[in-house]
Amino acid sequence: MDGDNMVTGTMTLTDNETGKSIDLPVIGGSIGPRVIDIRKLYAQSGHFTYDPGFMATAACRSNITYIDGDEGILLYRGYPIAELANKSDFMEVAYLLLYGELPTAKEREKFVYDITHHTMVHEQLTTFFRGFRRDAHPMAIMCGVVGALSAFYHDSTDIHDPYQRMVASYRLIAKMPTIAAMAFKYSLGQPFIYPKNSLSYAENFLHMAFAVPCEEMKVSPTLARAMDRIFILHADHEQNASTATVRNAGSSGANPFACIAAGIASLWGPAHGGANEAVLKMLARIGDKKNIPEFISHVKNKNEHEIQYGFGHRVYKNYDPRARVLRDSCHEVLDELGIKNDPLLDLAMELEKISLDDDYFISRRLYPNVDFYSGIILKAMGFPTSMFTVLFAIARTVGWVAQWTEMIADPDSKLMRPRQLFTGSAERHYIPVEKRG
């Protein structure tokens, strides 16, 4: 099926106070739950719906990514994530997310060429970094620098021009690794490394992040492959918080660079993209395998508000399919780097083992998610925890621009303006200060 929605039935809603009944269309997609079309609900009934966190609300229609959290399924344009992670590469997946189909050999060659030749940034942009403290969080730098791109690339900010939308999308995908590597180098006090067109997307990023001008560096194929796989697994994830933020900003007509900067800001939160950073901090707090039982007891105590990061997911109520892929990559990276007895890894594996055997986690279907393993891999590669969410942003930029482009072209798209259930004071009138009791 092509994924276009179609009316499949109606639902009758009766107001108990007035006895008035209205019929609401029920719409089915190509797969997944059907949705109740409530666009005319307020006009016909005078009622809004109440759904904190939009847990049961479809705010848009999309044919990019599908998730079945109960079954642990993630599909990009219909392709299972494990197949893409094991058989494809990030550039091919990026093309798939943007255009809906895997590229032919000729299409792939041109796409890779176009992205590769957009990786440099305007030289004046480098002066932006000097305005930040050296100890600034890299995500703070990313928010500022990516938002500033609209000041340098005026020729790709007309959202109504399909060609300019395409150029902006390519620029964002291409320049995000460069900006991320610059943020990393700035924090180290090292000179920026320019992109190399002879390297793949993942190789190029690792080279810009870890090379220095005074000596040659050859990027390990194993590490490049692991980095590429991390990019694939994080490329898109349906209507998550940062993607919804990009769509929200885009619905106002904001330029694409501003929209992606907004997505970066949303991604920064520890409940979203910052979770893999939180995993490492959590493991550091636990400190030793012997402390795991005590830590888990705190997690189980609802009055202590202790969170076990890296387990469970807002959507997945089964094993995160991305985590299965990264678990294998984790061991490949550690073997490549000769890390045999890493205390942090041993601690993480023991925490996983104990948690998966514990009825508390089993009954709540709290399984390891992608953040649990990605943090361990990135730490082993040499990235500080402050860079983890930045790497997430590199990958998710592809999904953001794909979702943003889809929203702009959707005739049903409207300025996002959620309603509210008001619980404040009813109308009242001003009382002069001398008359207030």
Image (tube, rainbow, N blue to C red):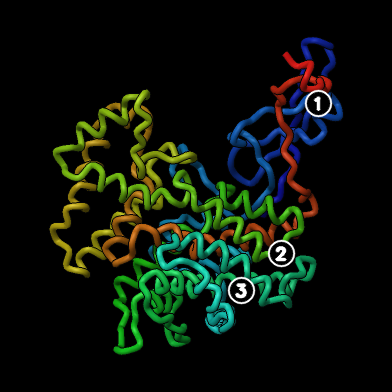
Q: Position of residue 25 (x, y in %)?
A: 77, 33
Amino acid identity at mark 2: Asn
- Local SS, label 1: strand
Q: Mark 1 or mark 2: name the one nearer the start of the chain.
A: 1
Q: Position of residue 185 (x, y in %)?
A: 40, 74
Q: Is any part of residue 108 visible from this angle?
A: no
> Disc 1, disc 2: CB below 8 Å?
no
Rendering quarter of residue 203: bottom left
Q: Which residue is mark 3?
A: 170
Q: Which residue is mark 1?
A: 23
Amino acid identity at mark 3: Tyr
Q: CA distance from mark 1 to mark 3?
A: 44 Å
Q: Mark 2 or mark 3: name the one nearer the start of the chain.
A: 3
Q: Image height check: is 358 above or below 278?
A: above
The answer to whether 341 appears left or right of 156 in the picture is left
Q: Mark 1 or mark 3: name the one nearer the start of the chain.
A: 1
Q: Is any part of residue 149 visible from this angle?
A: yes
Q: Is 348 in front, or is 124? A: 124
Q: Image height check: is 110 above or below 419?
A: below
- Local SS, label 3: helix
Q: Image height check: is 405 above or below 283?
A: below
Q: Nearer the viewer, mark 2 or mark 3?
A: 2
Q: Which residue appears at 73% of the width and 74% of the height?
A: 163
Amino acid identity at mark 1: Asp
Q: Which residue is mark 2?
A: 255
The answer to whether 162 appears left or right of 167 in the picture is right
Q: CA distance from mark 2 to mark 3?
A: 14 Å
Q: Is 129 in front, or is 249? A: 129
Q: For label 3, count other residues whose C-alpha is less than 10 Å away and answer few (under 14), some (14-19) or many (20+).
A: many
